[in-house]
Image (cartoon, grey):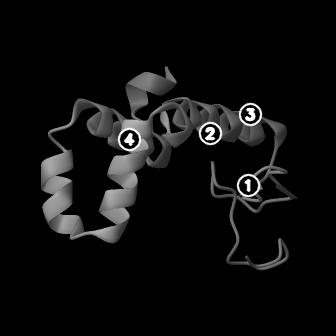
Amino acid sequence: MASLNSSAVVCVICLEKPKYRCPACRVPYCSVGCFRKHKGESAALRSLLLLFSPHLRQLMVSLNQGDKAKLMRVYMQEPLFVEFADCCLWIVEPSQDKDS
């Protein structure tokens, strides 16, 4: 990852110039508020993720090793995988109604 002095590096939450890195995952952030939001998002994803669901873990391993386009069509019929995908999408692009 580029140093924090690089102009290409931005805060993972607000896209401003970062001053810090997350001690757990090393992503850049600019303020305590952004760090707290990042930490909350990470916790939401972690609560759903692989450590707690052997079935989801196996789906992800299969997806990583197989025909991704074909498997995505199949896996999007799995409620647990859809919940995982929704959580990932919410982290990448939070909807307005969840922020209010």
Query: Is label 2 or label 4 in front?
Result: 4
For the residue carrying disc 2, how many other residues have a C-alpha within 10 Å: few (<14), some (14-19), or many (20+)?
Answer: some
Q: Secondary structure at mark 4?
A: helix
The percent coordinates of residue 28 (x first, y second) are 75, 59
Q: Secondary structure at mark 1?
A: loop
The residue to which callout 1 is attached is 25
What's the residue type where badge 4 is placed?
A: Leu
The image quarter containing residue 3 is bottom right
What's the residue type where badge 3 is placed?
A: Arg
Q: Are marks 1 and 3 in contact (CB under 8 Å)?
A: no
Is 96 on the left-hand or right-hand side of 39? Answer: left
Q: Are marks 2 and 1 in contact (CB under 8 Å)?
A: yes
What's the residue type where badge 2 is placed?
A: Ser
The residue to which callout 4 is attached is 56
Mark 2 or mark 1: name the one nearer the start of the chain: 1
Q: Alpha-carbon distance for marks 1 and 3?
A: 14 Å
For the residue carrying disc 4, how many other residues have a C-alpha within 10 Å: few (<14), some (14-19), or many (20+)?
Answer: some
For the residue carrying disc 1, how many other residues have a C-alpha within 10 Å: few (<14), some (14-19), or many (20+)?
Answer: few
The residue to which callout 2 is attached is 42
Q: Alpha-carbon distance for marks 2 and 1?
A: 10 Å
Q: Alpha-carbon distance for marks 3 and 4?
A: 27 Å
Q: Work out which quarter of the rendered image holds the N terminus and state it.
A: bottom right
Is 23 on the left-hand or right-hand side of 59? Answer: right
At horizontal 73% and vertical 55% (from top left) the residue drawn is 25
Query: Is label 4 or label 1 in front?
Result: 4
The residue to which callout 3 is attached is 36
The percent coordinates of residue 26 (x first, y second) are 77, 59
Mark 2 or mark 4: name the one nearer the start of the chain: 2
